[in-house]
């Protein structure tokens, strides 16, 4: 193929990734090609359960016996981890470490992924004075996400609530995750018809819920003007 013909060809690569693994590299030989990426979201609950079962089967027998394998028991695990494979693995390995001493599997109060996410939110809440948004702005946004009930809020709704600069900065800080309008989101129900903002994962949503639930009215008042 001569250079002119090669130049006229349009290469379109559709690379499909899930939110579980957004760290990838592109071979330099492909750098000049046009690549479209479609983020499909986390695994469904049935897919997550199958992944969980395969993970448990790979463990030594004494570790396998620590975990109930039925679908109803997995409801609780999915509530904590969502369809994020790395979080399912973290749940399992934390359970293996904690069961010999506590005899309790990770829960909403002990799962480290949730605790770390909650700690990060608390840090941003107390240091919001040095950010483009105030503590009240952050609480208003967290409340909007939690109260939405479906795991996402239209991007424009949050802009109307606190302004685009503040919302975009929260996205840059990894407090929120922006998901443009797409036909490929399998994990958002009901299916959004516009660009939306979500927590960075189910564990982050659980952290938001816990933070707001534990925030006393008096503490909330302290953030009103900060």
Image (cartoon, rainbow, N blue to C red):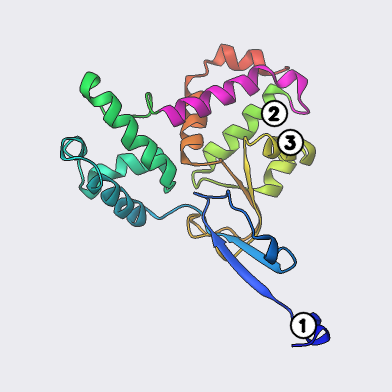
| Residue 74 x, y percent position in the rendering | 28, 44
Give the mark nearer the N terminus: 2 vs 3. Answer: 2
Residue at the spot 42% in from the left edge and 40% down from the top edge: 87
User: Which numbered tag is attached to residue 157?
Assistant: none
| Residue 145 x, y percent position in the rendering | 57, 39
Residue count near mark 3 (Cα–Cα under 10 Å), binned few <14, some 14–19, many ≥20: some
In this view, the residue farthest toward the front is: 2
Residues under labels 2 and 3: Cα distance?
12 Å
- Residue 100, quarter of the rendered image: top left
CB within 8 Å, label 1 to label 2? no
| Image quarter hosting the N terminus | bottom right
User: On screen, 220 above or below 181?
Assistant: above
Tag 1 secondary structure? helix
**Is 131 inside the magenta-drawn segment?**
yes
Tag 3 secondary structure? helix
Secondary structure predominantly adopted by residues drawn in magenta: helix
| Residue 48 x, y percent position in the rendering | 35, 51
- Residue 92, quarter of the rendered image: top left
Residue at the spot 35% in from the left edge and 56% down from the top edge: 47
- Residue 219, quarter of the rendered image: top right
User: Which numbered tag is attached to residue 137?
Assistant: 2
Which region shows up in magenta? 112-133
Residues under labels 1 and 3: Cα distance?
42 Å
Q: Name the residue under label 1.
A: 6
User: On screen, 68 above or below 214?
Assistant: below
From the viewer's perspective, tell me whether residue 163 is left or right of residue 144. right
Residues under labels 1 and 2: Cα distance?
53 Å
Give the mark nearer the N terminus: 1 vs 2. Answer: 1
From the viewer's perspective, tell me whether residue 123 is left or right of residue 129. left
């Amino acid at each position: 193929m001569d250079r002119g013909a090669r130049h006229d060809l349009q290469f379109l690569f559709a690379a499909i990734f899930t939110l579980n693994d957004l760290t990838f590299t592109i071979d330099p030989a492909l750098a000049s090609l046009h690549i479209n990426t479609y983020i499909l979201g986390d695994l469904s609950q049935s897919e997550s359960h199958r992944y969980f079962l395969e993970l448990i089967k790979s463990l030594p027998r004494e570790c396998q016996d620590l975990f109930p394998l039925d679908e109803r028991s997995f409801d609780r695990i999915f509530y904590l981890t969502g369809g994020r494979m790395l979080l399912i693995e973290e749940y399992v390995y934390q359970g293996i470490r904690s069961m010999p001493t506590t005899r309790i599997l990770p829960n909403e109060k002990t799962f480290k992924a949730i605790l770390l996410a909650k700690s990060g939110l608390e840090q941003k809440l107390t240091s919001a004075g040095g950010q483009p948004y105030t503590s009240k702005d952050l609480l208003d946004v967290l409340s909007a996400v939690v109260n939405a009930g479906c795991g996402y809020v239209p991007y424009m709704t949050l802009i109307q609530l606190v302004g685009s600069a503040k919302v975009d900065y929260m996205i840059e800080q990894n407090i929120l995750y922006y998901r443009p309008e797409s036909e490929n989101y399998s994990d958002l129900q009901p299916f959004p018809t516009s660009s939306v903002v979500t927590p960075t994962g189910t564990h982050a949503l659980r952290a938001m819920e816990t933070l707001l639930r534990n925030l006393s009215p008096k503490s909330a008042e302290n953030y009103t003007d900060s």
